Each structure stands twice: as structure tokens, then as C-alpha cells.
Image (spheres, rainbow, N blue to C red):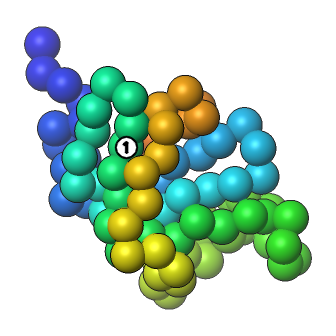
Amino acid sequence: MSDPFDRMLNEVVVLDTASPILYIGKLVEVTDQAYVLTEADMHDCREGHANKEAYLVEARRSSVAVNRARVVVLRWAIISVSRLADVVAD
């Protein structure tokens, strides 16, 4: 059985949390403890007008608002991982 993260390496992904925080960036490493993103956007959806889904649709349509060159996100903080390309933007 293959690791589902193997196909996501070097792709732009969304790390969703149970909080209003989203991480969007290129997944460069996955460890037992963390996800490592580069060219990343750490976004707090309490700041601004868009909820998580609206923010993701906008990020997919335009581009990622990079505010971190590299970020290490602890795995326990993440509830889901998906490719930004898989966000449905109807």
C-alpha cells in the first residue's frame, strides 16, 4: 500500500485545522511529527471577510499569498490535507 502523501510531495496543498487557521503551500516533507511547507501562506480566517472555503477558492483562482518561506506544522494540529488543485471552485 502506498503512502497517500507521496503523490502530494512538491504539490501545493491545504492543511486544514479545527481552528480558523489554514496553511497553504508546497509540501516538501512529511514526518511522523510534522508537515513541512515552503512558499506558504498561514492564514487566520478571523482576519478579513472570507471564511475558509471562500479563501481557498480565491487562492486557487488567483495565487497563494506567500507570507512564510518555510513553515513546520505539527501533525496533531491538522484535521485534513488536500491539494489546492482539488478545491472545487464552481
Q: Position of residue 9 (x, y in %)?
A: 20, 50
Residue at 39% from the left image edge and 37% from the top image edge = 34
Around disc 1, counting alpha carbons within 10 Å, would you say few (fewer than 14), some (14 to 19), or many (20 or more)?
some
In the image shown, does 76 or 18 lie closer to the viewer? 76
Q: Is residue 4 left or right of residue 60?
A: left
Q: Looking at this rendering, what residue extends furthest in the bottom direction? A: 62
Q: Is residue 55 left or right of residue 20?
A: left
Q: Looking at this rendering, what residue extends furthest in the top direction? A: 1
Q: Looking at this rendering, what residue extends furthest in the left direction? A: 1
Q: Amino acid at mark 1?
A: Tyr
* Residue position for label 1: 35
Residue at 23% from the left image edge and 46% from the top image edge = 29
Query: What element does badge 1 sit on?
Result: strand
Considering only vertical position in the picture, is 2 above or below 63?
above
Rendered image quadrant of residue 21: bottom right
In the image shown, does 55 or 72 lie closer to the viewer? 72
Considering only vertical position in the picture, is 31 above or below 8?
above
Q: Position of residue 61 (x, y in %)?
A: 51, 80
Q: Position of residue 53 (x, y in %)?
A: 69, 59
